[in-house]
Image: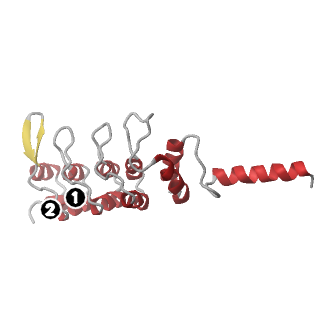
Amino acid sequence: MTRHVVYTSLFLAMLLAQATGAGACSDASDPWLELAVAVQAGDDERFACLIKQVGVNAYDPSDLWENTPLHIAAVHDQPAMARQMIDAGAEVNRQNAAGKTPLRMAIDEGADDTAATLIFGDADLEVPDFEGRTMLFWAVARDNASIARLLVEHGANRAQIFNVNGRDETISSYARRRGNREIILLFTE
């Protein structure tokens, strides 16, 4: 084998290792894009490398919604990654530009495992959105009985009042209107 072929083979091996996340942790040219891809793919090794580069509480300056890595993990239901970030000091209640916390995003996406991880990670269950609706409201609105139950078990306010079209309503009356029997039981226990 010629020296040129050996060097070319080594160069290709390095590129392949870098593309698959193998080998040394190197700086990414677009760490936020690569982080999003790693989270979506569940690539723990590449995620661990990239989170060191971007930080657990930063957000992509090109992201209109200012989502942190914890928001990204919530959207893609990656509870292990969420737990790692919480353990590393991620601000579990940080709101993005739309006023959504990672827990709210997990509830919206039906990412139950990550929602549970955030609840057990001391997420604030009573962070209201712009209309005063809390996490329990959104679990009821999504007919997610398991997360609604977990929220209630962790102290979510079942008597909370929110405002819709200038009219006050309780979460329990909203649940009754929606008709999900399992959720309605949460308000009668």
The reply to whether the C-beta atoms of the residues labelled 1 and 2 are less than 8 Å apart is yes
Per the rendering, the mark at residue 186 is: 2
On screen, residue 20 versus residue 80, left or right, reads: right
Residue 154 or 175: which is nearer the viewer? Answer: 154
Residue 78: x %, y % from top left: 42, 57
* In the image, residue 143 above or below residue 31: below
Q: Position of residue 183 (x, y in %)?
A: 18, 59
Q: Quadrant of the C terminus?
A: bottom left
Looking at the picture, the colour scheme in use is: secondary structure
10 Å crowding of disc 1: few (<14), some (14-19), many (20+): many
Amino acid marked by disc 1:
Ala
Left or right: residue 13 versus residue 141 is right
Within 10 angstroms of label 2, few (less than 14), some, or many (20 or more) residues? Answer: some
Q: Residue 55: image x %, image y %?
A: 44, 49
Residue 153 percent coordinates (x, y): 18, 65
Q: In terms of depth relative to the viewer, which is nearer, 188 or 160?
A: 160
Give SS at disc 1: helix
Q: Pick out the residue farthest to the right.
A: 2
Badge 1 or badge 2: first in the primary sequence: 1
Q: For mark 1, what is the residue?
A: 148
Q: Is residue 165 above or below residue 13?
A: above
- As shown in the figure, which amino acid type bears the numbered disc 2? Leu
Residue at position x 26%, y 62% in the image: 146
**Could you give the CA–CA distance between mark 1 and mark 2, rounded to whole angstroms?**
8 Å
Q: Residue at left 12%, top 56%? A: 158
Q: Answer left or right for 169 relative to 41.
A: left
Q: Kindly indicate the quadrant of the structure image that contains residue 112.
A: bottom left
Query: For the image shown, how many numbered marks are present on the structure?
Result: 2
Residue at left offset 59%, top offset 54%: 25
SS category of the residue bearing label 2: helix
Q: Quadrant of the N terminus?
A: bottom right
